Image (cartoon, rainbow, N blue to C red):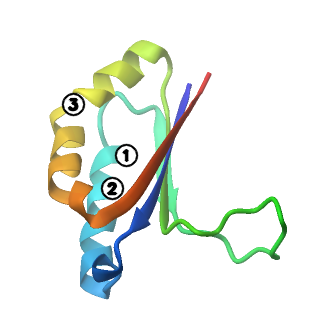
Amino acid sequence: MQHHVYFWLKAEHKTDEARAAFENGLNLCKGVSHVASGGWGKPAATADRAVTDKSWDYSLYLSFDNVEDHNAYQVDPDHHTFVAEHGHRSEKVIVMDVE
């Protein structure tokens, strides 16, 4: 299964220093042992189209071998550390899980 998370940062957290800290947190998430593969990114510089949303600042995408690994990730200490240290940086977060 796949776990997609989109983050809209608050204006005060769009500095180079704050972005670097947030990116380190994203790296922590993708390094959790239950994650089969993953990464993060920013909106691509593709042509504007009516169906393309580029309003977000970061996306985290993680693949899991099964739902059980996803559930274990949700309670992993590193995931909790990310939420505790970086949750305040976002004004909006959307999660999309895919079978």
For residue 39, above or below residue 15: above
Q: Which three-letter amino acid code belongs to the residue tagged 1?
A: Lys
Of residues 23 and 33, which is closer to you in this image? 23
Q: Quadrant of the N terminus?
A: top right
Is 49 situated left or right of 41 in this image?
right
Where residue 85 appears, as percent x and y from the top left, is 15, 56
Q: Quadrant of the C terminus?
A: top right
> Disc 2 vs disc 3: which is toward the camera?
3
Mark on residue 64? none
Q: CA distance from mark 3 to mark 1?
A: 12 Å
**Residue ID at (46%, 16%):** 67
> Disc 3 vs disc 1: which is toward the camera?
3
Q: Describe the element under mark 1 as helix, strand or loop.
A: helix
Do labels 2 and 3 touch, CB within 8 Å? no
Q: Which three-letter amino acid code belongs to the residue tagged 3?
A: Asp
Q: Which residue is mark 3?
A: 76
Do labels 1 and 2 touch, CB within 8 Å? yes
Mark 2: few, some, or many residues within 10 Å (few <14, many ≥20)? some
Q: Which residue is mark 1?
A: 30
